Amino acid sequence: MLVFEKAGEIRQHRWKNKSETWGLVPTMGFLHEGHLSLVRRAQQENDRVAVSIFVNPIQFNRKNDFDSYPGNLAEDLKMLQAEGADLVWTPRVEDIYSTNFQTYVSVEQITAVLEGAARPGHFRGVTTIVAILFNVFQPNHAYFGQKDAQQEAVIRRMVKDLHFNLEIVSCPIIREKDGLAMSSRNINLSKKARQEAPVLYRVLQLAKNMIADGETSAKLLRQAMIKEIGKSKIAKIDYISIADPATLDELETVENEALISLAVYWGDVRLIDNIRFHKEI
C-alpha cells in the first residue's frame, strides 16, 4: 500500500496503468467498519482502490466541532493495509488549499434545507473538497455511505451538473448491534448519551412501520418521533424530516416513497441518521 501527501504523486501513480479501473473512498479518517465496508465494495468493483484521509476544515461551521474531530492516522493506515487498499492520500491542509485559495463549488437549492440550513456553508465545503478529490484521483467509481443521505444527493447533483466522468456508488449504513449508525463522532458521546442514542434508529423504524401500516400524514409521523425522542432528558432535536428522496422537499403526505431523516444533539455531539421508505408495488 502506497501513502502519498502530494497530488502530483497521486496522479503519477494512478496513471501508471491506464487500463486499470479505480474506486475512490473519500474519508475524514478515524476509520470504522462503515468505512471499511466501502473499501471492500470498491475492491469488488475495481482493479485498484484508493482512499483519501483529510479532515476538511471548510465544511465545519463550528470551530470546536473541527477541533474535536477525532483522528488516528497510524491506526487508519494499519486498517487499510489489512484491507488491501492500494493507495492512500493523506494531504495536509496546505496541500489542498493554497495561499489565497478562491475557487469553491456550490450546489444550489438542494443544499438549502436540512443539513444545509442547520450548518451554513457546510455543503460548499463538501462539494469543493469532493470536486478536488475527483479531479486529482479521476476515479471510475466513488463510494459513499447512505448515512449522509443529503450529502449523497448533493454530490450526485454536482457530478451530473459538472459532467464528472465517474459513477457514484451508494452503500448501506453500517450499524452497531444496538442500531446506532457507526460514526467517527460516536466516540465523543458521554456514557449516558451512548446508552440513549440508539433511540434515533428506533424512531426511524417507528415512522417507517407507521407508513407501512397505512399512516400517510407526515405531521403525525413527526409527532410520534418527537414524542419518543422526548423521553430522553439530554437529547435535543435539531430537525426531523419526512422528505422526497430526490428533491428533499418536505412532504405533507407520504405516498410511494420518503426519506425519513433527523439530526439530534447529545450535549455537544450532533448525530444524524436516516431511513428510506419505498412502497412495494
Image (cartoon, grey):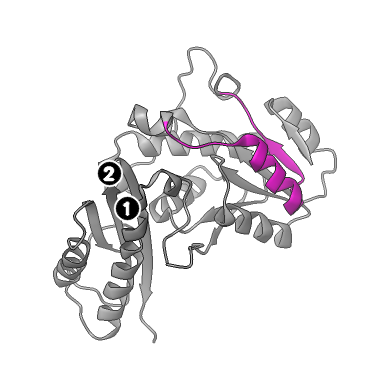
Q: Residue at x 27, y 48 (%)?
A: 265
Element class at badge 1: helix
Residue 191 is one of the magenta-drawn residues:
no
Q: Which residue occupies 31% across, 59% down?
A: 196
Instruction: Name the residue at 48% across, 46% down.
Output: 184
Q: Position of residue 212 (x, y in %)?
A: 30, 83
The reply to whether the C-beta atoms of the residues labelled 1 and 2 are less than 8 Å apart is yes
Q: Is residue 82 magenta?
A: yes
Q: Which mark is residue 193?
A: 1
Magenta residues? Answer: 68-92
Q: Amino acid at mark 1?
A: Ala
Residue 139 circle label: none
How many neighbours does mark 1 have within 10 angstroms: few (below 14), some (14-19), or many (20 or more)?
some
Residue sticking out furthest to the top:
99
User: Who is closer to the viewer here, 36 or 179?
Assistant: 179
Task: Inspect this view and state whether residue 246 appears.
Answer: no
Q: How many marks?
A: 2
Is residue 76 rendered to the left or right of residue 171? right
Q: Tell me the quarter of the picture where residue 77 sits.
A: top right
Q: Quadrant of the C terminus?
A: bottom left
Q: Is residue 91 visible?
A: yes
